[in-house]
Amino acid sequence: MTRAALETEPSSPWSHQLSTAAAAAAATALLLVLPAAGDTGSLVAVAVLQVALAVAWVPATGVPARAGAPVLGLAGAAGADLLVVVPERPGVGSLLAVPGLGLLAAVLHQMLRRAPRHDVVGSLAGVLLLLCAVCALAVLLLLPTAGDAAAATTALLVVGTALVAAPLVDLVLPRPPVAVGVPHGVPALVVAALAGAAVAALRHGGGPAALLVASVAGLLLGAVAALAGLAAAYAVPGARAWAAPVVRAVLPVAAAAPAAFALVLQDSL
């Protein structure tokens, strides 16, 4: 077997699930601990996740954009963070400029690739997905402005709990599988969503009606995180050991960030 084949050979289910759960726990801890130092801590935490995702993207997904993807990903991350940090009253709408300009940059990147250009559609889609992901991570910087600090923390805990619970459940109960040949079962998705509801309910104070709203919001956010985690697992079924867990953990956090912001904004958590 060649070295390249060894680098992309799928890992064992135990290694796959444990590394994903550990990476998700580390990402959640980073987002919860560093913001205690203030706004700078939040920016550092988000920036670390953005850089980790951009660097791990090509080794994990295998898209033919060895240099272009990380460069565009880091540029998009910097632009998104600046759009959130610099304005006195930042808004989510301003972040739309990142994928908008990113599309033009991604097309230019395809034009600059050496001929013959293999898998142009896959390369373009991979770069755009990375740009959307780093842009979505910047939404986490707006969580404290969407509601109170407790609700923002609850949202992060719900997402982190769901992303840790799903792979751990898959270790012991991977059946019935979501799809044939995929080491991820339906029970993991159900438990992850219920875990999100439990976290939201335990952290929410108030009457029965408010508790019910928080539980439903936690259930929905947990389900979003779990489904995004499943999608990330599809994207990197077998990859270099150091890169795959990073993408499987950080990409779902990015996908869940806009949903978390919306729920905090509506005072549902």
Image (cartoon, grey):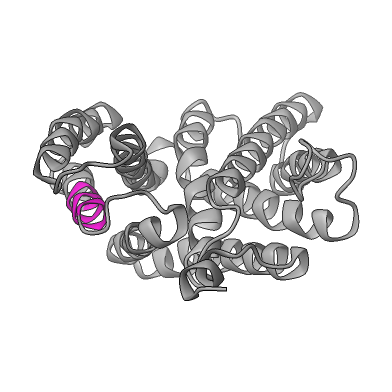
Residue 152 x %, y %: 50, 46
Residue at point 77%, 68% (across, down): 14
Which residue occupies 41% across, 43% down? 143
The prevailing secondary structure element of the residues shown in magenta is helix
Given residues 1 and 124, the one toward you in this image is 1
Position of residue 22 relative to residue 199, above or below, is below
Depth check: give the residue in front, 129 or 214.
129
Residue 53 in sight: no
Say whether residue 48 is left or right of residue 166: left
Quarter of the rendering occupied by the C terminus: top right
Instruction: Specify start and end residues of the magenta stretch as a single range.
Output: 68-77
Q: Nearer the viewer, residue 103 or 111?
A: 111
> In the figure, 83 relative to 77: above or below?
above
Judge whether residue 152 is colored magenta.
no
The image shows residue 229 at horizontal and vertical percentages of 61, 46
Give the image location of residue 174, x and y in percent.
Answer: 85, 50
Residue closest to the eye, 219 or 243? 243
